Amino acid sequence: MDLGKRHGIRVGHPTTLRPFLIINSTHSPENDPSNRLAYSSRKCHRGTVGAGPRGNAIALHDVPDLMAEFLPIANDIIGATATGKLHPLIAASAISSGFVYIHPYVDGNGRLSRVLMQHALAAGDQQPDHRIIIPISAAIEREKQKYYDTLAVVSRTVMRSVQYDVDPQGEVHVHNDTKDLYRYPDLTAMTTYLGDRVHTAVERDLVDERRILTIYDTAQPALQRMSNLAQKDLDHFFRFCKQNQWSLSKNKRAKFEELTDNQITEMEKVLQETVANLSE
């Protein structure tokens, strides 16, 4: 899948989940309740009390079995995508949504699901000579509610069959078996949504990111000569200026006490002229 062809970029080419998802199906809260990779010992309520969970409510005893099934299937999907037998968007939808619906950990499930999403998209590139990560998280973040709404397409149907209650602390307690409810979700809506977000990430976010990197690479030598800042501090200076229409705010000036007002003004001018020249 050559998503970035018109911009001269490609995604990477991993073939297995192991480098990204170091999970063992023997992890459980009983074995190691302090381990953040152990499966969650509780299901936290994530919606309004009257409406039930905004996402899923899988019985705790079902989570280890579902994860034990998920991992080999996910690796098979990655393998099929890497050999061109499965479209990367379908793979990304199946793996990331499957994981986030199981929601096995106390924290970090959304971030891990987006790592898996990137991993599946990268597996679909048949020529991994130019590796790059599609900034799909940025594209999702701009329409986060739509992401939640798309997840809810499956959740609304499933939750009709889940027997649960919410205690005064806001925790969800599930009373029936739920494994079969989450084994075969219809991910048409999620696949369509991800296709739209990938398109946006390639057409907008990658272009913007490439532009910012070009501005930095062009201006960096002059900024370095003017300031003699350490690389880390120069990176911060650039980022702060970018956040404030290419000038350093008064609040941020206190972070660069070694620079005079004149130096800051000249450095801002370099950035502003670079931006103007690259925009022509």
Image (tube, rainbow, N blue to C red):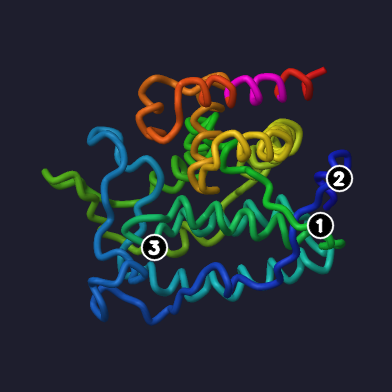
Which residue is found at the position 51% from the left and 25% from the top?
Answer: 264
Quarter occupied by residue 209:
top right
User: Residue 8 has which mark?
Assistant: 2
Above or below 241: residue 169: below
Left or right: 269 as drawn, with respect to 146: right
State the image coordinates of residue 76 (x, y, percent, origin top left).
Answer: 68, 72
> Tags 3 and 2 in contact by the CB under 8 Å rule?
no
Report which residue position mark 3 lands on: 104
Report which residue position mark 1 lands on: 130
Name the residue type under label 3. Answer: Pro
User: Looking at this rendering, what residue extends furthest in the left direction?
Assistant: 168
Which residue is found at the position 44% from the left and 40% from the top?
Answer: 156
Which residue is found at the position 54% from the left and 30% from the top?
Answer: 143
Mark 3 vs 2, N-terminal side: 2
User: Is the stretch drawn in magenta largely helix, strand or loop?
Assistant: helix
Left or right: 174 as drawn, with respect to 184: left
> Tags 2 and 1 in contact by the CB under 8 Å rule?
yes
Residue 267 or 65: which is nearer the viewer?
Answer: 267
Which residue is found at the position 39% from the left and 20% from the top?
Answer: 250
**Foreground tag (3 vs 2):** 2
Callout 1 secondary element? loop
Q: Which residues are magenta?
A: 268-274
Callout 3 secondary element? loop
Q: Estimate the spatial distance between the alpha carbons at disc 2 and disc 1, rounded to whole Å.
A: 8 Å
Quarter occupied by residue 245:
top right
Quarter occupied by residue 117:
bottom right
Q: Is residue 192 visible?
A: no
Q: Estimate the spatial distance between the alpha carbons at disc 1 and disc 3, rounded to whole Å.
A: 34 Å
Mark 2 vs 1, N-terminal side: 2
Residue 269 sits inside the magenta stretch: yes
